[in-house]
Image: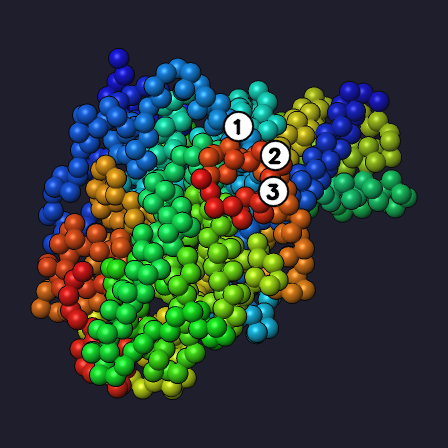
């Protein structure tokens, strides 16, 4: 087993564990005070104009009509059309759309190859139409093509527009360069060696079986190496928005659950209100022993 | 020797020495429609006097909202900076900030700097796109400081996030910068990721207030502290508020020709109505109209004369979780004591959000008395047939301002519109409206803040986009021969419109009056003599 295989294992595991860590971190954060922002997508019959149950007189006596479908629809629309960018930042839309579609295709292919590898590892016959056919070539070329063009356009924009350049962080550039290098290595591998992604499929299947399939080409090695770097870094960067968006939208923007009997909110809040406070301002004077309730019941300075 | 200004501005420049980092550029301000396009903004601009500049910090943009004094010694400066770092750590901890930890962390960790939010911000756009007012700018300063000094800071994270120095310049400018955002969250609505730059301003204000005791004095000392001690941020103690309401009752009785008597502290009433007490002093016709409407509709209601019970404001919403909780608990205790069926909040947007939404989760069962908006109660009254209307009395162009806190933050969009469609035949919408509205420019406390030259910043920058939007709603009808009405069902928004209209002489030049919703309802109510609405600017 060579370094590349170990690297592949480590980075795949790093990706999965990193994503899991982040997701668990956000999911287990304490309940926050309400901070919803309208439109709230699950408001049945009202989401289209941004209305809420607060529009009803004696709203607490009425049944709340919530629709999961509404949330799914908005998220899908956002993921598939980048609606917000289209509406509010039209110049960014085409580059961003190309870039994201490139990633969607490549991510889907990676997942398919991984699933194929797993299937082979547990004894299924290789799906030659997937691992050896034209479909994979077209799929890969399309993903790489869209991703590369999108990345280049995004990079030109970020470098070329003074305001965008100035308001960027070093990480924004690092990500785009990292993508470009990854795509360059992937193109190298695609053009010179593995146009059908059969080698990628074998390599992954080998990993699944615990066998060290030879990478076979320097380009392929570079591709795996950089992809690994990318995978291990992604959960710790703002690129994690691919899954943390669930929290920003579902757990904050659309989190409108009122404190009514049966919701369990009161119980959670009572625990949190007993936490010690150490804010130092004169009207609080938290000493690490006083609780939120203690401070809230005082009159201040 | 510090340079006069830095151009172009980058995030890390916030800590650099410069007399003024990025002054308000009067030539670049967003244009207003005719005839206001010919106005010279310099006439509204107030330059801070040189002596005052020596006393207070104004090195962000030449404006001082906080009257922040410079530290008198290096030791004092060091202490303040250490306090900032301590506060930052608390802001990122469960114990000290469970209230907003999840939304804050998510917002700090996921901005891609795509700038999709920038054009949504009325302050950034109104200023002519001054870099320091870019929604992501202040958030990035905090992001960079958190990566350097926050919990879990490490050199790689700091290098990737970008550099910024923590020094007095950064400290003072960031405190001011947290007060160049109205917390309207229009930028948040535009963000594809769900990053909340408005929340970051809110959390920054909390850091300064809760750790260092630095807050706008109108919000804290003469705001929430005064409300808790005296009873109201207006300074009115219970006896004075009762006197004032008695006076309003007399005036209303005269107007309608039958006796109006506001009930006080009526145990077991269906409705405890809490006004923004500023209405009682500045727009007495508003609580007066409420009394008329409720009496005529036969609603069982009461006001409370307890400390804080007659003032719905809760300025803690804008800068301090503890002040928010203290005032909200007072409101809940009063409702419980009176045994009312529900609390109805008068025409005040931030009070709506504070008591109904933000404080919702801190109320335990016995204090969790249902709370609702006056807009829904008014819709119920107007649509129920309990009152009859003569809409022709409101036969003038009317447009509607959507207070951010009621609409974008609570989703109360249609009740006020259904009412207006019934009682105001020439009602028209602004563009954009509803949840996409623009803030009046007085949000987050700005409406009550006028220290130093802050008011001129509000008129020229914060309220600019809104003013344009209002004027555009009456395109072709701005001639003063046509009376027209801006319906703004929120005291803070009205305060901002009063000052903004005064600054630009809007009423004199266009005959555009602003006011609340209940006044329009009562003006069109059968049984109320014609002319309830007095066409007088105040
Ligand atoms: S806050 Fe959102 S919209 Fe604004 S720059 Fe960051 S990611 Fe883009
Ligand atoms: S909350 Fe409003 S004022 Fe503040 S940055 Fe966002 S859009 Fe601008």
User: In which quadrant is the N terminus of chain B drawn?
Assistant: top left
* Inter-mark Cα distance, 2 to 1: 13 Å
Which residue matches tag 3? A291
Q: Residue at x 84, y 27 (%)?
A: A212
* Inter-mark Cα distance, 3 to 2: 8 Å
Q: Label 2: how many residues lie within 10 Å, few (<14), some (14-19) or many (20+)?
A: some
Q: Are marks 3 and 1 on the same chain?
A: no
Chain of residue at mark 2: A
**Quadrant location of residue A223?**
top right
Q: Residue at x 29, y 48 (%)?
A: B448
Which mark, by number, is residue A32?
A: none
- Helix, strand or loop at label 1? It is helix
Tell me residue B304's x, y (percent): 41, 65
- Helix, strand or loop at label 2? It is loop
- Helix, strand or loop at label 3? It is loop
Which residue matches tag 2? A288
**Residue B111 in view:** no
**Quadrant location of residue B293?**
bottom left
**Quadrant location of residue B138?**
top left
* Inter-mark Cα distance, 3 to 1: 18 Å
Q: Label 3: how many residues lie within 10 Å, few (<14), some (14-19) or many (20+)?
A: many
Which residue matches tag 1? B86
Chain of residue at mark 1: B
Tell me residue B373's x, y (percent): 43, 67
């Amino acid at each position: 087993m060579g370094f590349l295989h170990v690297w592949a294992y480590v980075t795949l595991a790093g990706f999965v564990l990193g994503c899991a860590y982040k997701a668990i971190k956000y999911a287990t954060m304490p309940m926050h005070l309400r901070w919803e922002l309208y439109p709230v997508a699950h408001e049945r019959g009202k989401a289209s104009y941004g209305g809420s149950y607060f529009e009803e007189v004696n709203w607490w006596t009425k049944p709340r009509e919530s629709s999961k479908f509404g949330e799914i629809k908005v998220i899908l629309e956002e993921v598939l059309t980048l609606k917000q960018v289209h509406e509010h930042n039209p110049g960014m839309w085409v580059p961003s759309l190309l870039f994201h579609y490139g990633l969607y295709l490549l991510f889907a292919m990676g997942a398919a190859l991984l699933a194929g590898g797993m299937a082979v590892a547990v004894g299924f016959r290789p799906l030659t139409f997937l691992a050896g056919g034209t479909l994979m070539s077209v799929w890969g070329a399309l993903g790489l093509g869209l991703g590369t063009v999108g990345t280049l356009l995004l990079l030109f924009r970020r470098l070329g527009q003074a305001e965008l350049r100035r308001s960027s962080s070093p990480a924004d550039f690092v990500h785009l360069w990292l993508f470009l290098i990854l795509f360059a290595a992937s193109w190298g591998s695609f053009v010179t060696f593995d146009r059908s992604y059969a080698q990628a499929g074998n390599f992954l299947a080998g990993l699944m079986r615990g066998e060290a399939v030879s990478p076979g080409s320097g380009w392929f090695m570079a591709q795996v190496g950089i992809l690994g770097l990318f995978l291990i870094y992604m959960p710790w960067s703002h690129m994690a928005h691919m899954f943390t968006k669930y929290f920003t939208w579902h757990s904050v923007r659309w989190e409108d659950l009122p404190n009514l009997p049966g919701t369990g909110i009161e119980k959670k809040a009572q625990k949190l209100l007993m936490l010690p406070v150490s804010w130092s301002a004169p009207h609080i004077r938290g000493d690490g022993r006083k609780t939120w309730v203690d401070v809230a019941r005082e009159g201040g300075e | 020797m510090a340079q006069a200004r830095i151009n172009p501005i980058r995030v890390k420049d916030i800590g650099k020495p410069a007399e003024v980092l990025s002054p308000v550029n009067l030539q670049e301000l967003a244009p207003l429609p005719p005839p206001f396009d010919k106005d010279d903004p310099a006439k509204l601009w107030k330059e801070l006097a040189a002596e005052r500049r020596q006393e207070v910090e104004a090195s962000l943009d030449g404006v001082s909202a906080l009257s922040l004094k410079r530290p008198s010694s290096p030791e004092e400066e060091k202490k303040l900076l250490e306090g900032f770092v301590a506060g930052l750590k608390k802001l990122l901890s469960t114990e000290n900030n469970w209230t907003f930890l999840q939304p804050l962390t998510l917002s700090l960790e996921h901005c891609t700097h795509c700038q999709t939010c920038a054009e949504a911000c009325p302050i950034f756009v109104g200023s002519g796109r001054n870099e320091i007012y870019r929604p992501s700018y202040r958030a990035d300063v905090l992001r960079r400081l958190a990566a350097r000094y926050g919990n879990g800071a490490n050199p790689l994270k700091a290098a990737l996030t970008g550099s910024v120095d923590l020094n007095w310049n950064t400290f003072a400018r960031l405190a001011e910068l947290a007060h160049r955002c109205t917390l309207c969250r229009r930028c948040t609505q535009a963000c594809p990721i769900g990053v909340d730059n408005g929340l970051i301003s809110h959390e920054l204000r909390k850091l300064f207030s809760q750790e260092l005791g630095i807050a706008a004095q109108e919000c804290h000392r003469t705001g929430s502290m005064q409300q808790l001690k005296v009873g109201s941020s207006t300074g009115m103690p219970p006896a004075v508020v009762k006197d004032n309401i008695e006076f309003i009752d007399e005036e209303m009785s005269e107007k309608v020709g039958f006796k109006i008597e506001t009930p006080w502290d009526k145990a077991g009433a269906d409705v405890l109505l809490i006004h923004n007490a500023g209405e009682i002093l500045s727009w007495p016709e508003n609580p007066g109209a409420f009394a008329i409407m409720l009496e005529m509709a036969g609603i069982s209601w009461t006001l409370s004369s307890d400390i804080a019970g007659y003032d719905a404001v809760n300025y803690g919403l804008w800068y301090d979780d503890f002040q928010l909780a203290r005032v909200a608990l007072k409101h809940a205790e009063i409702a419980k004591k009176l045994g009312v069926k529900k609390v109805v909040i008068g025409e005040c947007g931030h009070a709506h959000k504070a008591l109904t939404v933000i404080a919702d989760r801190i109320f335990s069962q016995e204090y969790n008395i249902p709370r609702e908006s006056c807009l829904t109660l008014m819709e119920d009254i107007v649509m129920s047939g309990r009152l009859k209307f003569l809409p022709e009395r409101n036969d003038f162009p009317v447009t509607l301002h959507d207070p951010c806190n009621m609409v974008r933050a609570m989703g109360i969009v249609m009740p006020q519109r259904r009412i207006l469609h019934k009682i105001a035949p020439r009602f028209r919408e602004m563009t954009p409206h509803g949840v996409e509205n623009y803030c009046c420019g007085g949000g987050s406390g700005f409406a009550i803040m006028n220290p130093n030259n802050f008011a001129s910043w509000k008129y020229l920058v914060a309220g600019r986009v809104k003013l344009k939007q209002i004027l555009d709603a009456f395109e072709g009808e701005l001639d003063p021969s046509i009376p027209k009405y801006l319906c703004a069902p929120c005291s803070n928004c009205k305060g901002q419109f009063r000052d903004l209209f005064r600054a630009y002489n809007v009423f004199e030049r266009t005959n555009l009056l602003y006011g609340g919703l209940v006044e329009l309802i009562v003006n069109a109510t059968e049984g109320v003599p014609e002319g309830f609405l007095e066409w007088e600017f105040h």
